[in-house]
Amino acid sequence: MNNNQKSDHDFAVVVPMANEEADFGVFTSALAGTLDRIQSGRVYMVVDKASKDRTLELCRELASKDRRFEVVWAEKDRHVVDAYMNGYRAAAKNGHEVIIEMDAGMSHDPRALPMFLRVLNEGNECAFGSRFINGGSIYNTNRYRTFLSRFGTTLSNVLLGTRLFDMTSGYQGFHLNVVKEFIEFPLRSTGHFYQTELRYLLRFKRYAEIPIHYRVPSPSISASSIRNSLSTLIYYFCKRITGHPASIK
């Protein structure tokens, strides 16, 4: 069996889960239904101390009933990027050929998973979800949040020399060899800007953008997240203009 054939049947989904009690049943039922249709897949639910409700308990109950779901208790997480990376490490350790990252709470629609698998089965190393290409959308938000997402993409493309339609989306998937490279890279982001950082670092990989529908869980973005985003962006911009651009090749 070659790698392209294997990616259809051996894939994992990494989902950070924090304070998801309210939407837990809806999301996990939708995700399980998609796995049923694909007839494959394993889900790594990453929970850490940021979660203050019954999310961990619910994850453990689900994992005890459905072996396709596994709990990754990441007690030492410092921020959300640690949660993503711990999920990737767990999936990579088990050798899944394709690993897809998504958010819980129906922010990302599980029904889009087959599109990611198809793109990654067509010779691409990376598949990036995009809200701003034909067929994509962003909803349940306000003009300020939409502006930040679009402006962040434009600013990142200008300063970093990238050409993606969406540089700030979190729904994305990779082949195992790519995951093994970036989980060892010293990422600078501590918040969701890490997805922009990752897309910049992987700009030389073979990739494609996939239209997604994104439901914004919160209309606001914390000041600390914005500061970290700007400092990380400036760092890579300075490295680029001084002739020392960073990348994961």
Image (cartoon, rainbow, N blue to C red):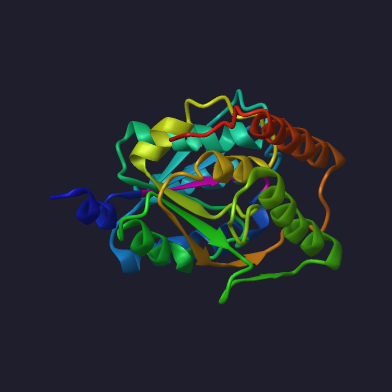
- In the displayed structure, 186 sits above or below 202; it is above
Residue 248 shown left or right of residue 213 in the figure? left
Q: Is residue 105 magenta?
A: no
Q: Position of residue 233 (x, y in %)?
A: 72, 38
- In the displayed structure, 228 sits above or below 173; it is above
- Res 244 seen here: yes
* Front-most of residues 128 and 43: 128
- Res 90 seen here: no
- Image quarter where the C terminus lies is top left
The structure residue drawn at horizontal position 13% and vertical position 50%, both measured from the top left corner, is: 1
Q: Position of residue 195 (x, y in %)?
A: 60, 45
Dominant secondary structure of the residues highlighted in magenta in the image: strand
Q: Which quadrant holds residue 175?
A: top left
Residue 96 shown left or right of residue 158 in the figure? left
The structure residue drawn at horizontal position 81% and vertical position 49%, both measured from the top left corner, is: 221
Q: Which residues are magenta?
A: 12-19
Outermost left residue:
1
The structure residue drawn at horizontal position 82% and vertical position 36%, both measured from the top left corner, is: 227
The structure residue drawn at horizontal position 67% and vertical position 39%, both measured from the top left corner, is: 51
Outermost bottom residue:
135
